[in-house]
Image (cartoon, coloured by chain):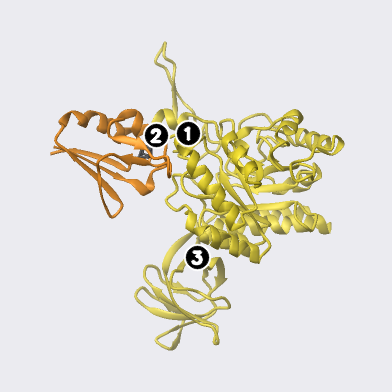
Amino acid sequence: MTSTGKIELMAPAGNFESLQAALDNGADSIYFGVEQLNMRARASINFTLKDLSEITRRCKGKNVRTYLTLNTIIYDHDLSLVKTLLDAAKNAGVTAVIAMDQAVIAYARQINMEVHISTQINITNIETVKFYSLFADTMVMSRELSLRQVKKICDQIKKEEIKGPSGNLVEVEVFGHGALCMAVSGKCYLSLHSYNSSANRGACKQNCRKKYTVTDQETGFEIELDNEYMMSPKDLCTLDFLDQVIDTGVKVLKVEGRGRSPEYVATVIKTYREAIDAYYDDTYTKEKVVTWMGELEKVYNRGFWSGYYLGQKLGEWSDGSGSQATQKKVYVGKGVHYFPKAGIAEFKIEAYDIMLGDKLLVTGPTTGAKEFHLTGIMVNDKNSENAKKGDSCTIPLDFRIRLSDKLYKIVPS
Amino acid sequence: MVIVTLQRNKCIGCNYCVEMASLQFQMSKKDGKSVLLNSIEKKGFFTLKSHDNSIFEDCLQAQKACPVKIITVKQV
Ligand code: SF4
């Protein structure tokens, strides 16, 4: 939990762009993977050991906690990498490790590193909480629990004073937003069986997100599951009942999506930040929820549902394989220079024209993800209504841009 | 001749290549990634050239099994 006593908002960070977006938009903590032993091992962009100190430096500056995910299955040949990673994380001042395998838990305890129990362990009852309290201060509840069940566990932790190694009461974490999968969290073999690509090593191919035909082997009769992606649930969203989630006594709310874009992280974290603050200010209203939901729908989603929290029957299936986001970004060009005194940024337009009034987005490892409306353009030192492919243009901007930054235009999808 | 290459930095250490071709691949205990035995490195690509054609089948299986598709096998 945060020092303010509010529920902790935990953001995914797949790379420096997303990390910065999380920091800029009000995350209390971030989680990230390093090298291959995490659930996004396949991602082309993953942090390396060398990035650890930069990650903790940026986060400490903002008083944001850092969690290293080390939550795949672990083989014998992984054991020394586990130690290397944990030693390096401890040295860099990473707050805690999110672990599943007992070898990881044991070594983290040995070097006195805070342990969080990963979703993959699937905690669903108070006795299991008690068992893991010998090793861990925070535990993620299984995604299959209802809010009523979560509340019971939280109440029982208080009543029985179940404490973790730190001497404080065990904190309960739940998933607040993002993709859900049809399998018991993190224990799916579909990808392994069809593509030899184990989800449990962070190499999920997401083949559940496709359309399938079911065949009756006796008659050969084929059923096409009409318009329903039978194994592809909608995305979890708890924003419209966030008050009920917080009332259970949960201490950490986790946003899923380490493979997502920086603007996704920015939008989702900003929205949940506002909703959480509103809850504690007593200004969490239905009207605001409507506005917030509109914001969330703009970025990647497969449609929203409330997961298993409100006790619905299983299965709210997505009716498409891809995103239903209401807007998308198109690449425009890249950053060239920033003139801090004048507050002016120079961009090279490479792909797509821009016009006054356009909604633009800049992303970059240090810049994160920042949106703005285009209020002025100069091309060749002259005021202009637009800038075209091939132009170098300058734009008044109140934040610094860098050479590594990319400029996008936001358009309805 | 059989030519096998491994783009080692992208390995996720899943061990499948070792199961398929245990005479050519081994898991490193240092960094948990696969090692292509007797290979020579150039810019992150490890290449093994072997005159023993009998290794082709196993290495091909390893190529197929690798989830991140970083093994290639050729017979020349
Ligand atoms: S199969 Fe591919 S990813 Fe798996 S250990 Fe071998 S080289 Fe690495």
Q: Are marks 1 and 2 in contact (CB under 8 Å)?
A: yes
Task: Identify the colour of chain B in the image.
Answer: orange
- Picture coordinates of residue A324, whole percent (x, y): 53, 48
- Name the mark on residue A75: 1
Letter of the chain that mark 1 sits on in the rendering: A
Q: Amino acid at mark 3?
A: Thr
Q: Amino acid at mark 2?
A: Asn
* Residue at the far front in the pictured view: A110
> For the residue with label 2, is its CB less than 8 Å from the closest atom of ligand 1?
yes
Q: Is residue A364 left or right of residue B4?
A: right
- Name the mark on residue A363: 3
The residue under the point 79% across, 44% down is: A167
* Residue at the far bottom in the pictured view: A381
Pointer 3 and pointer 2 on the same chain = no
The residue pinned by badge 2 equals B15
- Picture coordinates of residue A3, whole percent (x, y): 78, 57
Q: Secondary structure at mark 3?
A: strand
How far apart are the alpha carbons under marks 3 and 2?
36 Å
Letter of the chain that mark 2 sits on in the rendering: B
How far apart are the alpha carbons under marks 1 and 2?
9 Å
- Picture coordinates of residue A169, whole percent (x, y): 80, 43
> For the residue with label 1, is its CB less than 8 Å from the closest atom of ligand 1?
no
Q: Quadrant of residue A115?
A: top right
Q: Which mark is nearer the camera, 3 or 2?
A: 2
Depth check: A254 or B50 in front?
B50
Q: Amino acid at mark 1?
A: Tyr
Q: Quadrant of residue A60?
A: bottom right
Depth check: A200 or A349 in front?
A200
Q: Quadrant of residue A124?
A: top right
